[in-house]
Image (spheres, rainbow, N blue to C red):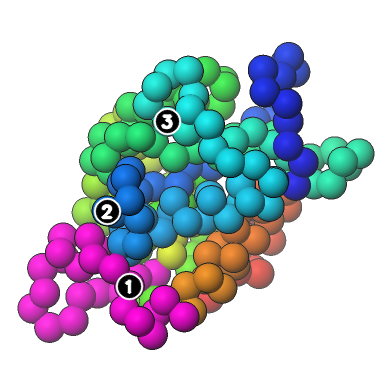
Amino acid sequence: MRLLGRGSSEPPGDVWLVVGLGNPGPSYAGHRHNVGYLVVAELAGRMGSGFRAHKSGRAEVVEGRLAPPGVEAPRVVLARARTYMNESGGAVKQLATFYKVPPERIVAVHDELDLPFDTMRVKLGGGDNGHNGLKSLRSALGTGDFYRVRLGIGRPPGRQDVADFVLSDYAASERKALPLQVAVAADAVESLVTDGLERTQGRFNS
């Protein structure tokens, strides 16, 4: 992945906005609800760059390309909101407007209760399924027709409350497998913006 210089003067074109959904701050960092943050952090690491505050003040971003230098590839903006999950749509809408990114070039990376842990699905559009981040994005963008990279976290055991479950740390056994899950999800994002949905689904939908 190649990093773009800050303040790039390139005209808007085939820009993708990849948003990792989560809650800001160290107290939320290890929660299941924050796996989207982990994936965009992995992608930023592959770019060799850390996040910087966007001028909107509501998000942090990294800009780059998903290819080595000299290879034509889409420009990508990685983002994570500085607002809480249920208010993330406003920050994403501001970024989409600033970078002139239509909904069909937005990728939301998020946790998914209805998928078992260590499984993943990539799709375009769909419902919110009770996910406050997706609900906020749909409301702010006026559509749900954006891409989703859905990382399974499974359902809470027994009678544990869903909100308590998603806002809790991964189990010890899950933490061992988590780095690979995050790396594969990052691979899926790269595939999606370079090779398209059909090929990505064929490779990564488990």
Q: Is residue 69 left or right of residue 107?
A: right
The span shown in magenta is 152-176
Decide if residue 157 is on the left or right side of residue 122. left
In this rendering, the answer to whether 204 lies above or below 65 is below
| Tag shown at residue 170 | 1
Q: Position of residue 4 (x, y in %)?
A: 73, 30
Q: Earlier in the sequence, mark 3 or mark 2?
A: 2
Above or below, comparing residue 183 to residue 56 in the picture: below
Residue 165 covered by magenta stretch: yes
Q: Is residue 161 above or below residue 33?
A: below
Residue with the mark numbered 3: 59
Q: Which mark is residue 206?
A: none
- Left or right placement of residue 156 versus residue 148 in this view: left
Which residue appears at 58% of the width and 55% of the height?
A: 42
Residue type at the position of mark 3 = Ala
Local SS, label 3: strand
Decide which of tag 1 and tag 2 comes sooner along the chain.
2
Q: Residue type at mark 1: give it.
A: Tyr
Q: Residue at x 43, y 54 (%)?
A: 36
Q: Is residue 188 magenta?
A: no
Residue at coordinates 39% horizontally, 47% vertically from top-left? 21
Instruction: Evaluate whether residue 102 shows in this view.
Output: no
Tag of residue 27: 2
Nearest the viewer among 121 and 59 is: 59
Please identify the quarter of the rendering in which residue 74 is found.
top right
Please name the amino acid that badge 2 sits on.
Ser
Image depth: mark 1 or mark 2 in front = 2
Q: Earlier in the sequence, mark 1 or mark 3?
A: 3
Q: CA distance from mark 3 to mark 2?
A: 18 Å
